[in-house]
Amino acid sequence: MRILKNKIIILVTIFMSLFFIGQISSSYAQTAPDGSRAVVDAPGTEFWEAVRRNNQPLNSQVDSADGGTLIYTDGMAWLKFRSELLMPYFGYTLGATLLAILAFWLLRRSIGIPGGESGNRVQRTVTYERVVHWTM
């Protein structure tokens, strides 16, 4: 009974936390008079866009070819590859792999021992070693 009570308390706490987080985040969202989300201009947006494109004159203490680069934009190519190609096809590959494992298991099942089991068991590790291995 005590375990059930603790689980209920945890579930109620999680639910209330998610509810209040939703309320807080929705209260920060700005809406236009027609009910749609309002577009708010952030101060300095043009400046940081120019910095990102390296169009803004900068002074740096580092004397190197990339000394004036504040925002390194080459990572955008990786982000585009990751979001458009890697992640969707990774899901398909993972699903195909799981289906292949399932098909192999259904077709082959377990691999039997030709002479049958002998009844002798060999203890590979003691309980202490397993506990240390999986907890350390």
Image (cartoon, grey):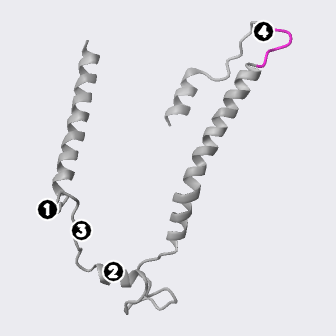
**Of callouts 2 and 3, the N-terminal one:** 3
**Of callouts 3 and 4, the N-terminal one:** 3
Q: Which quadrant of the rendered structure holds the N terminus?
A: top left
Where, by quadrant of the figure, is residue 100 drawn? top right
Report crowding for label 1: few under 14, some 14 to 19, many 20 or more residues within 10 A (C-alpha): few
Q: Where is residue 7 in the image (x, y as percent from the top left)?
A: 28, 23
Q: Nearer the viewer, mark 2 or mark 1?
A: 1
Q: What residue type is labelled 1?
A: Pro
Q: Which of 70 and 47 is in front in this view?
A: 47
Report crowding for label 2: few under 14, some 14 to 19, many 20 or more residues within 10 A (C-alpha): some
Mark 3 highlights which residue? 39
Mark 1 highlights which residue? 33
Q: Which amino acid does label 3 sit on?
A: Val
Q: Whole-Å distance between the Cαs marked 3 and 1? A: 12 Å
Task: Give yes or no for residue 115 being in the magenta stretch.
Answer: yes
Q: Whole-Å distance between the Cαs marked 2 and 4? A: 71 Å
Task: Give yes or no for residue 82 being in the magenta stretch.
Answer: no
Q: Whole-Å distance between the Cαs marked 1 and 4? A: 77 Å
Q: What residue type is labelled 2?
A: Trp
Per the rendering, the mark at residue 48 is: 2
Q: Nearer the viewer, residue 74 or 33?
A: 33
Q: What residue type is labelled 4?
A: Glu
**Of callouts 2 and 1, the N-terminal one:** 1
Mark 4 highlights which residue? 117
* Tags 2 and 3 touching, CB below 8 Å: no
The relative height of residue 25 versus residue 2 in the rendered view (above or below) is below
**Of callouts 2 and 4, the N-terminal one:** 2
Query: What is the residue that sits farthest to the left in this orientation?
Result: 33
* Tags 3 and 1 touching, CB below 8 Å: no
For label 1, the SS is loop
